[in-house]
Amino acid sequence: MIAPQTHFDLQLPVSTWQGRYLQNGCGGYCGTVSGQTFPSCDATLRGDFAMATDDEGHITAAGLGGGGLFAFNDQKLRDEYGYESEQALYEVSRQIIKDYYGVYPDESYYNGCSDGGREAMEMAERYPDDFNGIIAGAPEIIAGPLNAENQTWDVRVNTDAQGNAILTDDKLPALHAAVIAGCGHDDGTNDGIITDPQDCSQHLNQILQSVQCPETTYTPCLTPAQVTVAREIYDGPSDPGGRLLYPGGMPLGSEMGWSVFELPPSPNGGEVPTTESLDYFGLSQPYLRYQLNRPGQLGPDPSVYHCGGGYANAVTPDLIYPMVQWAEDGTAPRQLAISYTVGSSSFSRPVYPYPYIPQYNGSGDQSSAASFHPVVAPAAARGTDYTNWYGNYLFYQPIGGGGRDQGYARRG
């Protein structure tokens, strides 16, 4: 345990250590020391990583942080959760490694997703000299608006005057089928996955019209009120003046995952988002200002949900080895092949550094990643690949005379 109360797990290979250290993040509000497994690239690197992870300074059942109850009236534990525990774990692990092996690690890496992705970005910003390479998966870096405005919005727009849910998760398969029919061919094949959900949004009106009762081929169809809710969830929260309070809503293609956090209890179950954690954190979740100092973070893996899974059953490859090659050899990953299974069909698709997405060559095996080439994502080509939301001033340099409603250019 690291004072005041951060519990951690540090695994030290007895005879197979390769000289590298890997620190792993955790999800939700953490609250538990997650199990660790050595990366699959260990054999390629001729030995095992020393690895560590922690609970971010508190213990809570189910690893979800009890909705943030640990932070109630305790600024120190807020700081531990926010950033201090991860830097402390880095320092403690390095010293124990030195005591055990007689030398410090040659290279240190960080890997996290969701809250772990936020931790990864915190380390990149606050302690840029600690890690040689960082994987920040699905980073939850704008936590205040996410938990307050966005999740509250999803509940409010989906609640009728009697307090009942309008759109329930038994209607999600029909909505999802309409989205796939509208955009599942955007890479030049009819593979049933959406390569560019952001560009798919231009077809939103047509998609919602196709699934609304009674002019629909989908069963069950959506009522006009349910279509309105779906549109509000896609658009995301806004104030009475129309300004977005969070950078976008749910992306098209994510519908089958809405029953976890986006929809209140329904005939098929579901989980209600809560805003009580904001009170525990003192309404003081900080935003992150982050500049990417080197190009090539890989773009999004299409058709997966938060940190993996998804209707396409994507199998994400081991990202540790490409990160090691990039950090130690200077070889940035040009693409990764992702394997998918949709129904009874299996295939692979390439993922490129942003802003490139895969497009079918027009010939060749449509199930092989080798039959695709990179093209610039349409939104990036149009210069509209960012959301003009109320908090843009945190990430972009203002253009013009001032104010939060003006245009912005990327910082750096």
Image (cartoon, rainbow, N blue to C red):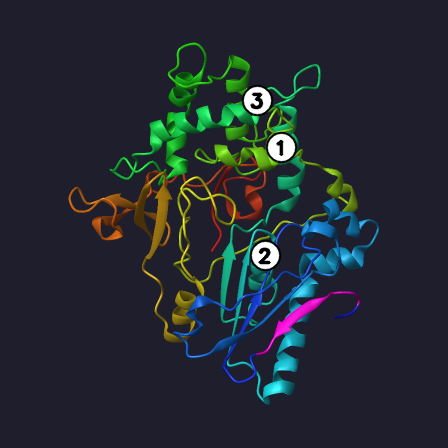
**361 displayed left or right of 187:** left
Can residue 245 be seen by looking at this rendering?
no
- Amino acid type at mark 1: Gly
Q: Which mark is residue 56?
A: none
- Amino acid type at mark 3: Leu
Circle 3 crowding by C-alpha within 10 Å: few under 14, some 14–19, many from 20? many
Vertical placement of 237 versus 53: above or below?
Answer: above
Q: Nearer the viewer, mark 2 or mark 1?
A: 1
First in residue order: circle 3 vs circle 2: 2
Report which residue position mark 2 lands on.
Answer: 116
Q: Which mark is residue 270?
A: 1
Q: What residue sits 39% from the left and 25% below the top?
A: 178
Circle 1 crowding by C-alpha within 10 Å: few under 14, some 14–19, many from 20? some
Magenta segment boundaries in residue numbering: 4-12
Gap between marks 3 and 2 measured at Cα: 31 Å
Q: Which corner quadrant of the image does residue 343 belong to? A: top left
Vertical placement of 81 versus 305: above or below?
Answer: below
First in residue order: circle 3 vs circle 1: 3
Vertical placement of 337 versus 326: above or below?
Answer: above
Report which residue position mark 3 lands on.
Answer: 167
